[in-house]
Amino acid sequence: MTTRSNWGSKLGFVLAAAGSAIGLGAIWKFPYVTAMNGGGVFLLLFLFFSFTLGLAQMVVEFTLGRSAQTGPVGMFRKLAGKSWPLIGIMGIFAGFVLYSFYSVVGGWTMAYLALAMDGSVLTTDTRVLKDTFEHYVSNPFWPILTHGLFVLATLGIVIGGIEKGIERASKLLMPGLFIIMLILIARSLTLPGAWQGVVAFFAPDFSKLTPAMVVDALGLAFFSLSLGTGGMIAYGSYVKQETPVLHSAAWVVGLSCTVAILAGLMIFPALFAFKLDPSAGPGLTFMTMPVVFASLPFGQIFAIAFFALLSVAALTSSVSMLELIATLFLDEYKLPRRKVILSLSLAVFLCGIPASLSFGPWADVKFFGKTIFDLMDYSVSNVMMPLGGIGVALFAGWRVWPLLEEHSGLSGLPLLGLKWSCRVVAPLSIAVILVKNL
């Protein structure tokens, strides 16, 4: 039997796990969700939930994976058996669906990298930027091509394995993401009217606080950390037994929240400086940042760097999704990594095509009132991930708590807090998200 891989270093593990958590959720989704929810007060809620329930759940998933030294299906089978592995199977299916439509958006980042190279998105005319975005995503050919290129790029990293593939890529790419973000923030803050955006982002207006906002912040905090599908269990399964999970989990949450805040500092000043509409939603990043670049000296260079690193952020998440799916076949069936990664990548590419076409030729094809892309997103984000999160929390709190008690690295009041988070608080909180979103 082949010896199972491990992360080569704690730094590599933390950067890879942080990359999984950061992804497009922090840079692409967080700014527009925060903008649509009133800014500062939503940010406070997001940070609170990230460092409480989010951190607790991450400690749980890392500990379970490290203890079992296998992916989520094998973890449930090894530690409990019976019907528990069904939770792992659901998580892997959710990861497959998520990766299928996520790679479509990842392809958009690659397309915008090409558009930045030819300079066609360097304009301060927001109407032109909106038209460019909408024309591109509705095209029946190009988004599928870039979707395929993104899948190939992910394949190229994951096929190299844990240490030589995912870890090596994370060590090279994650620091670059931070550097470019800081450079872009420095410029964004000098735009006329930018300070209004900073105030709106950080200053909490509690008059805007609503129960729905609390639930939205809880959901975004929980799921932006890549919790609920078993991805962190899979990454934790490659951790050496002596690696402390609490310290690693705290670093991952901290880095993820830091990137989210930096993304907000890039987007919010531009929103106010150019009077952009936050309800642009998913296209906000693609329709906002080019305005900043167009006002920069040597803006094209920064545009190329930004969209290259946005692609990198997307990749650091997609590699964790592909690795999660692969653990089922690598651990349970002992199939060769190359064959597994190639086959899964082809399947993901094919399943992502309908999601891409739902912005164009198949825009009118709807199920339950949703396009194919929206239905895939909804089923994963609002159904499977919450159910997976509830299942993992209850499993840890009630079925294998002695294992968590011994190996989580916690003691005293924090350990007691983790126990009741798993047994009551986390399942109930996620259930509220589930019911609200349904």
Image (cartoon, grey):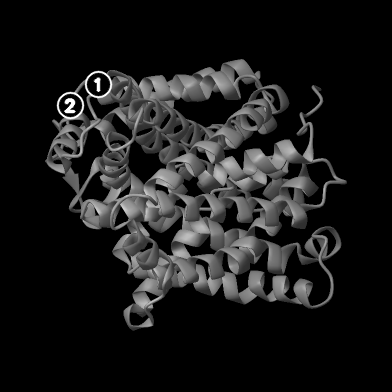
Identified at 76% across, 57% down, the residue is 246
| 411 to the left or right of 217 | right
Identified at 20% across, 39% down, the residue is 124
Of residues 418 and 110, the one nearer the viewer is: 110
Q: From mark 1 to mark 2, how far is it between C-alphas?
A: 6 Å
Residue 87 on image: x %, y %:
57, 52
Which label is found at residue 409? none
Q: Please indicate, yes or no, whether residue 3 appears anywhere in the rendered image.
A: yes
Residue 438 on image: x %, y %:
33, 64
Identified at 52% across, 74% down, the residue is 428
Amino acid on which the number 1 mark rests in the picture: Trp
Label 2 environment density (alpha carbons within 10 Å; few <14, some 14–19, many ≥20): some
Which quarter of the picture shows residue 294? top left
Label 1 environment density (alpha carbons within 10 Å; few <14, some 14–19, many ≥20): some
| 297 to the left or right of 169 | left
Of residues 185 and 331, the one nearer the viewer is: 185
Of residues 270 and 137, the one nearer the viewer is: 270
Residue 134 on image: x %, y %:
17, 36
Q: Are marks 1 and 2 in contact (CB under 8 Å)?
A: yes
Which label is found at residue 142? 1
Look at the picture and state if 402 lies above or below 250.
below
Which quarter of the picture shows residue 302? top left
Residue 429 on image: x %, y %:
51, 72
Quarter of the N terminus within the rendering = top right
| 101 to the left or right of 384 | left
Look at the picture and state if 386 lies above or below 188.
below
Identify residue for label 2: 139
Amino acid on which the number 2 mark rests in the picture: Asn
Element class at badge 1: helix
Which quarter of the picture shows residue 406? bottom right
